[in-house]
Amino acid sequence: MTVRIVGAGPTGALLAILLRRRGLDVTIYESRRDPRSAPPETGRSINLALADRGIEALRRVGVFDEVFSRLVPMTGRMIHDQRGSTSLQPYGMRAAEVIYSISRHRLNQALLDLAIRQYGVEVRFEHRLEAADFAGGVAQLRDLRADRLETVPMSPLLACDGAGSRLRRDMQAAALITASEQALDHGYKELSIPAGADGEYRMQKNALHIWPRGRHMLIALPNDDGSFTATLFLQNSGLVSFASLDAAATIESFLAENFPDVVSLMPDRVAEFLANPTGFLGTVHADPWSVGGQAAIIGDAAHAIVPFHGQGMNCCLEDCLEFDACLEGQTDWQRVFRDFHARRKPNTDAIAVMALENYLEMREHVADARFRLRSALALELERRFPERFIPRYSMVMFHHEIPYATALSRGRVQARLLEELTAGAATLADVDYVRAQTEIERQLEPLAVIRSSVTNECA
Ligand SMILES: Cc1cc2nc3c(=O)[nH]c(=O)nc-3n(C[C@H](O)[C@H](O)[C@H](O)COP(=O)(O)OP(=O)(O)OC[C@H]3O[C@@H](n4cnc5c(N)ncnc54)[C@H](O)[C@@H]3O)c2cc1C
């Protein structure tokens, strides 16, 4: 049997590897050129934060070791205030609790290389899905080199074609699913911070840098060549927005006023601002994710999220493991799709909520003293009561065995506790830890219970 996959991004490539390991033949259709012979795209998140869920998936197929030497660990958030002072907020309380900056292009290449090396996997680049005919059970793809339409059977067709998924839009147009693309009123633009003359990093290398400014923010992730890639998140329209910043002089004064300590490290800032595209940010909701046993959407195509938790790709890679688990002992595609949706949807809904909440946290709260005290207390409570209390950020980023939905619900209880325990406290020494213990034991189940209830088998 041949499974057809649309899209050779991280989701499509990893899925192909896992399906092949189950003995299925796979053909991937990808609209772009082969990334192994094409230069990386510009203006589209050059680097990504890779965390435990993504690492777990990459480990399972042996790609993590391959990319490891090119990863840059980030141990915490380096906050840059308006005056240029910096402070590091550690991500976790253990040395291993770091996230990694990884090149999107390199990761994609490593996954695709492995997929293509498998006998039984074929990739057809420059083939674009153009339409799906669910009544006829076929899809139409255009061979962009020959400008020729090809018709292929679905059953099954797995669309991993990203946030703007063609297949999702066709399913929605045929009223077979409900779907929405909720746009954020902010967009993003990439700017570069080159390495120094001797290839050295010009800011602290092992951190994710943030310039939180309330309604907008700049972040920068390190690359492995001494440079950083910065991303400006800003409103699309309004007084201070991508729409209003349309001339060199206003762009320069906006950057200099808001990010004074970094402008000198971005020599091409204004030219890049004018030349680079403004990216769209939004959340995709779809329900269900499949049409009978014919076709399904997976990854960003089903549940794209805003990038503020650094989890979009991590979540997509975890999708692939979950989809693979649903194939255990069965090839009834309708059941596989149904089980996958039932198992996964509560978790992808949860990370969508947390990603949106994290935007406010990054652009506003990280600069706030009360927030910093609550964050420090969360780490302290984990140190004292590790069997019951793990900060929400850590559950999401460092604990793939804790589902996103659990992180969201426990996180809500924990947020209330942190609020109560820090009321009237100025430092960690002021916190009543006896009360903390009593409340934690009363309100939070031991994590061992959660871990033992998570199964790798599908419903
Ligand atoms: C600014 C920004 C920063 C981000 N940062 C992070 C981060 O730090 N950490 C993280 O985990 N995630 C991050 N993400 C999210 C991450 O980029 C996505 O979740 C991930 O790329 C989704 O993978 P995918 O394979 O599902 O889709 P995509 O990566 O979008 O891949 C889809 C593939 O399908 C192909 N395709 C599309 N349409 C068709 C068609 N009609 N026919 C054939 N092929 C088609 C495309 O060419 C592409 O190769 C970020 C996203 C953005 C926008």
Image: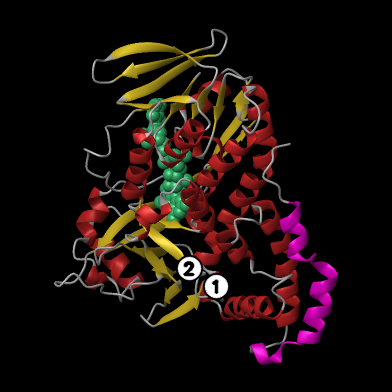
Q: Is mark 2 within 8 Å of ligand 1?
A: no
Give the position of the C terminus as an image quadrant: top right
Name the side, left or right, on which 241 lies relative to 362: left
Question: Dot 1 lies on which element?
Answer: loop
Relative to 121, residue 155 above or below: above
> In front: 161, or 241?
161
Residue at image location 56% in from the left, 42% down from the top: 321
- Residue 206 x, y percent position in the rendering: 38, 72
> Which mark sits nearer the N-terminus, 2 or 1?
1
Asked whether residue 88 is in view, the answer is: yes
Name the side, left or right, on which 189 lies relative to 49: left
- Kindly identify which numbered label has been placed on residue 92: 1
The part of the chain drawn in magenta is: 428-453
The magenta stretch spans residue 331: no
- Residue 431 x, y percent position in the rendering: 72, 87
- Kindly identify which numbered label has been placed on residue 177: none
> What is the three-letter code of the residue carrying label 2?
Val
> In front: 91, or 95?
95
Q: Mark 2 Cα within 10 Å, few/some/many (few <14, many 20+)?
A: many
Residue at image location 25% in from the left, 39% down from the top: 36
Q: According to the image, label 2 marks what residue?
A: 98
Tags 2 and 1 in contact by the CB under 8 Å rule? Answer: yes
Measured in 3D between alpha carbons, the distance from the residue under mark 2 to the one under mark 1, in whole angstroms, is 7 Å
Residue at image location 59% in from the left, 65% down from the top: 393
Relative to 346, residue 136 above or below: above
> What is the three-letter code of the residue carrying label 1?
Gly
